[in-house]
Image (spheres, grey):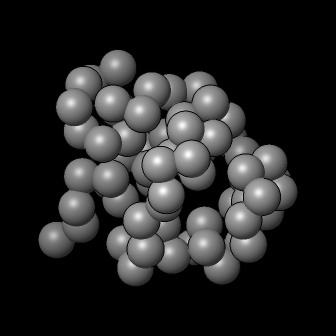
C-alpha cells in the first residue's frame, strides 16, 4: 500500500498536467528522483517538498496528508 505522500504526490502531479521531466527541471532534481517519489521509493527533503508544492499548486500540508486542500 502506498503511503499518503505517494498518493497525494501522484494526484497533484496528475492534476497539474505537468510531465515528470518538466517538474524535475523546475525543482532541480532528476527525472529518476521524480519517478522514485511517484513509486514511493524515496521522499523529498523539506526544501524539495516546498518546491514541489509550489510547482504543483498545492500545499505541503496536502502532500503530507495534513489537510485536504
Q: Name the residue located 49 percent from the left edge and 58 percent from the top edge.
A: 45
Q: Quadrant of the N terminus?
A: bottom left
Q: Quadrant of residue 22?
A: bottom right
Q: Name the residue located 35 percent from the left edge and 59 percent from the top edge.
A: 6
Q: Name the residue located 55 percent from the left edge and 38 percent from the top edge.
A: 50
54 left or right, relative to 68: right
State whether residue 25 is above or below residue 38: above
- Residue 20: % across, % down: 70, 60
The answer, for residue 56, to whether it is visible in the render is: no
Q: Quadrant of the C terminus?
A: top left
- Residue 57: % across, % down: 59, 26
State whether residue 12 is above or below residue 2: above
60 left or right, relative to 4: right
State whether residue 68 is above or below residue 7: above
28 left or right, relative to 68: right
Q: Quadrant of residue 66?
A: top left
State whether residue 1 is above or below residue 19: below
- Residue 10: % across, % down: 45, 53
Amino acid at each position: 500500500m502506498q503511503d499518503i505522500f505517494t498518493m497525494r504526490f501522484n494526484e497533484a502531479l496528475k492534476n497539474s498536467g505537468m510531465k515528470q521531466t518538466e517538474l524535475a527541471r523546475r525543482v532541480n532534481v532528476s527525472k529518476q528522483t521524480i519517478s522514485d517519489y511517484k513509486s514511493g521509493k524515496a521522499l523529498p527533503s523539506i526544501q524539495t517538498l516546498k518546491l514541489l508544492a509550489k510547482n504543483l499548486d498545492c500545499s505541503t500540508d496536502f502532500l503530507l496528508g495534513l489537510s485536504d486542500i
